[in-house]
Amino acid sequence: MPETLRGDCANCFGLCCVALPFAKSADFAVNKASGEPCRNLQEDFRCGIHTKLRPSGFSGCTVYDCFGAGQKVSQVTFGGVSWREAPESSRQMYEVFPVMRQLHELLRYLTEALALAAARPLHGELRRSLARVEALTEGTADELEKLDVSAVRGEVNPLLLKTSALVRATAGGRTKSRRGADLIGARLRGAKLRGADLRGSLLIAADLTGADLSLADLIGADLRDADLSGADLTGALFLTQPQLNAARGDASTRLPSGFERPAHWAAR
């Protein structure tokens, strides 16, 4: 995945630590309103407890990724001028950031789709869609603030669905569809879900120990606290690092190339 689609905190104004709100819960130790800097944000826009977020009660921060939107807004949209240097721009910067984040998430999915051999028949459409979304990310702050990002997602989604169908068809046999299913706490130990459609499914705290999730479409699947110990996710479609970070797993969990094994996973 291109570095431009990975968060680069060194070139961001700590936007996820300021623009986004969070409520005191198991994921966050305190309440924070939108536009209010997190108490852990330092003067250099870096997190003061980055290496100990989980034990400090901020596990929610470890499952967030801006897909490179933070540095794009900071260095391109606002020309490297921070909300501290120009407080008058802060409101708009906070409004633009989540829009850019959604656009970058789409770029991440489209880029992945273009790398899939099975999706070759769609590569022309995928390239055109990628170019269009990239052009939108280069818009002015005013243009981005007014952008109907839901409509953009609506244009891209059919292509991603077609990509998914082509890739999952290579799994062989009849693939299962659990799109949007409520599988919270489900007992899916050893489940044969190769090539399954799990888009938007709720797999919170599900037992997926030893499950075969290879070539499964996991776009938007909620994997919070799901147990992926020994599971096979090779070739899983549209999986993101934050999804893995939110789950549990171990050294035997098989991951697609390019992903990092979360530090909090069991070593067994």
Image (cartoon, rainbow, N blue to C red):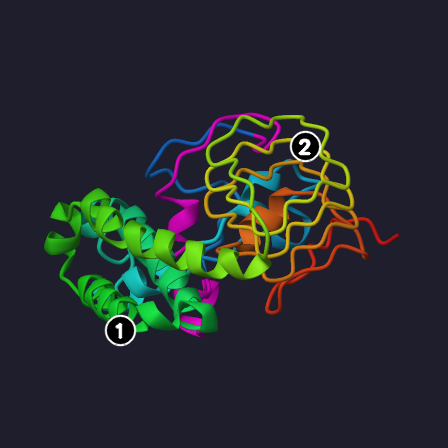
Question: Looking at the image, can residue 116 be seen?
Answer: no
Q: Does 12 appear in magenta?
A: yes
Q: Is residue 99 above or below residue 260?
A: above
| Amino acid at circle 1 | Gly
Q: Tell me where the magenta segment starts and ends, as one range.
A: 1-29
The residue positioned 67% from the left and 31% from the top of the image is 205
The residue positioned 51% from the left and 39% from the top of the image is 177
On the image, the x and y values in percent for residue 4 come to 39, 71
Where disc 2 sits, the SS reads loop
On the image, the x and y values in percent for residue 156 come to 27, 54
Give the left or right position of residue 141, taking residue 56 as reference: left
Going from the N terminus, do you reach mark 2 or mark 1 first? 1
Q: Quadrant of residue 129?
A: bottom left
Where disc 1 sits, the SS reads helix
Tag 1 residue: 124
Tag 2 residue: 206
**Which is more toward the observer, 208 or 264?**
208
**Which is more toward the observer, 56 or 156?**
156
**Which is more toward the observer, 126 or 244?**
126
